[in-house]
Amino acid sequence: MQTGLAILLERSGLTPRGEPRAMSGGDIAAVYWLDTDQGAVVAKRDDPERLSGEADGLRALHEAASSLVVPEVLALEGEWLIMEALKSGSRSVRSASTLGDGLKALHDNVADEHGWHRDNACGLTPQPNAPLADGRDFQRERRLLPLAQACHERGLLDARLRGRIEVVAEGLDAWLPHAPASLLHGDLWSGNVLHTPQGPAILDPAVYRHYPEVDLAMLTLFGSPGEAFFEAYWNGRAPDDWPRREALFQLYPLLNHLLLFGGGYRGAVERAVAIVEQA
């Protein structure tokens, strides 16, 4: 067992039973399952600043998301984060509905300012969260324009498509209404939802406050949470402009994927821009 992890386990009163076992899905961080005399834990090794941001988000969600399962942070020091281990169960109509209800309740935690008290990361990309009073300004200045610039500087966006994204960003005030800032998971793609025997769990957050559709758009980016989820979340009151909002709030994660993984995501970026433009 690696020395840093062994020391942190001892300081936290956790007695290991056997060696850590590598878990799948750790593309950015190294993630391990470890049985202890006090129960199973997950240990994650990563950049200390990213781990600190993740732990901060997990604590915020654990406090606010009373009807969703959020792994408890057990210890954090340097490049190691230790948290409660969750066992996978089966996805069902009931668990999808519970996820919808729970996410709606999470989003009902609102504040006046969009952003967060600290920066964190979305994957490997630093995520600036300095608060702004208007969500349209936040989406423009903290999300779309910085990522479009970064992608352009790396040759991943040509000047024409970057210009279209800038027009979308500058035009938000014309159609996107001002709204209070909901507490978000922030990176809620399907791989960060785990259906456990205790109910749906949300993992690996990049927490901040913004429009609630941010989390919904991430859930539909690489799949769908299902009809039962949306029935529970919207309760028959889906916004008329959901397709446009969905495309808008998928732009930031798509730009992030373009930045991290290359030009294969350029077409998806262009399609999302076109939907926002044509709506």
Image (spheres, rainbow, N blue to C red):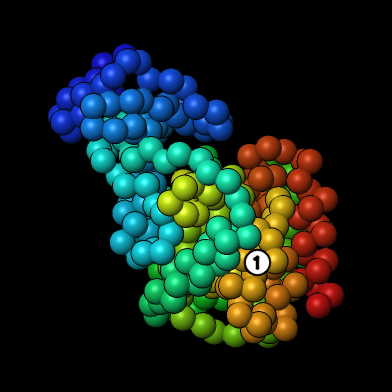
Q: Quadrant of residue 83?
A: top left
Q: Quadrant of residue 12?
A: top left
Where residue 144 sits: x, y (%)?
62, 61
Asked if residue 197 is positioned above or below residue 98 in the image, the reply reads above
- Drawn side of residue 78 relative to residue 98, left or right: left
Asked if residue 46 is positioned above or below residue 181 in the image, the reply reads above
Residue 272 visible from this viewpoint: yes
State the residue in front, 150 or 229: 229
State the residue in front, 146 or 18: 18
Quadrant placement of the C terminus? bottom right
Q: Residue at x 36, y 64 (%)?
A: 66
Asked if residue 237 is positioned above or below residue 4 in the image, the reply reads below
Q: Residue at x 52, y 75 (%)?
A: 135
State the residue in front, 113 or 83: 83
Q: Amino acid at mark 1?
A: Ala
Where residue 262 sits: x, y (%)?
72, 38
- Drawn side of residue 124 relative to residue 75, left or right: right
Which residue lies under the disc numbered 1?
A: 228
Residue 137 visible from this viewpoint: no
Asked if residue 254 is positioned above or below residue 5 in the image, the reply reads below
Mark 1 secondary-structure assignment: helix
Q: Residue at x 66, y 45 (%)?
A: 257
Where residue 6 sits: x, y (%)?
24, 20
